[in-house]
Image (cartoon, helix red, strand yellow):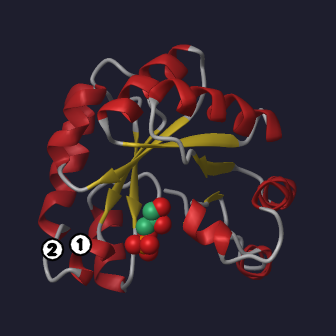
Amino acid sequence: MKFFLDTASLDKILFWKNFDLVHGVTTNPTLLSKESSDPIKVIKEICKIVNGDVSAQVTEKDSKEMIEQAKFLKSINKKKIVIKLPCTLEGIKASKYLANQNYKINITLGFDPAQVSVFKNINISYFSFIIGRVEDFGDSNIENIPLVKSMIMKLNPKIKFLAASIRNSNQLLSAASNGADVI
Ligand code: G3P
């Protein structure tokens, strides 16, 4: 199991690297907007200091535009950049095209284990299943964690289960003990 830091802060990445706990980073536009530098420069810097996958999210809504944006994002660092795509119909279309072109894809936001069905024949690298944010809204996704793992194993074991939006130790323990590949 790996730990990916959900941040765009170089300081936070460098801090947690001291504990060998940064095996990858998952940025998103909101996180990047909190940094003072240009987002693309920040992603470039993150790729320099992280020895692992770095998710960079598209902001376009149409699949063709997502694909063009993905090409640009991948050009930042061909080895490390993972394209984060939304689990919308347009995002799924883009994921099918890009996975066929050997792009690494991180699909977000996973709220329901049934969403994994869509990726039976699309070799995305990561399915991001949101846990903490669901609890922020007064609901729970904890009981669905084993179902995500079992859906992935039954339908497409190539997909890595990324347990996202972790807020506390109970969420971490549930994800780790139920086969999350990445926290
Ligand atoms: O990329 C999605 C992830 O960052 C959600 O995490 O902590 O904002 O709920 P959070």
Whether residue 6 is visible: no
Q: How many angstroms separate mark 2 from mark 1 (CA)?
A: 6 Å
| Circle 1 SS class | helix
Q: Quadrant of residue 154?
A: top left
Q: Where residue 29 sits: x, y (%)?
A: 59, 61
Compared with 160, 12 (above or below) is below
In the image, what residue occupies the spot 51% across and 22% down?
99
**Dot 2: what SS?**
loop
According to the image, label 2 marks what residue? 140
41 to the left or right of 63? right
- Crowd class of label 1 (few under 14; some 14 to 19; many from 20; radius 10 Å): some
- Labels 2 & 1 near each other (Cβ < 8 A): yes
User: Is residue 115 left or right of 108 when viewed as pictured?
Assistant: left
Expressed as whole percent of the image width and height from the top left, the position of residue 77 reads 80, 39
Eyeballing the image, is 155 above or below 181? Answer: above
For ligand 1, the image quadrant comes to bottom left
Image check: 92 left or right of 140?
right
* Nearer to us in this view, 169 or 78: 78
Residue 103, above or below 183 = above
Residue at x 60% of width, y 19% of height: 102
Residue named by callout 1? 134
Q: Residue type at mark 2? A: Ser
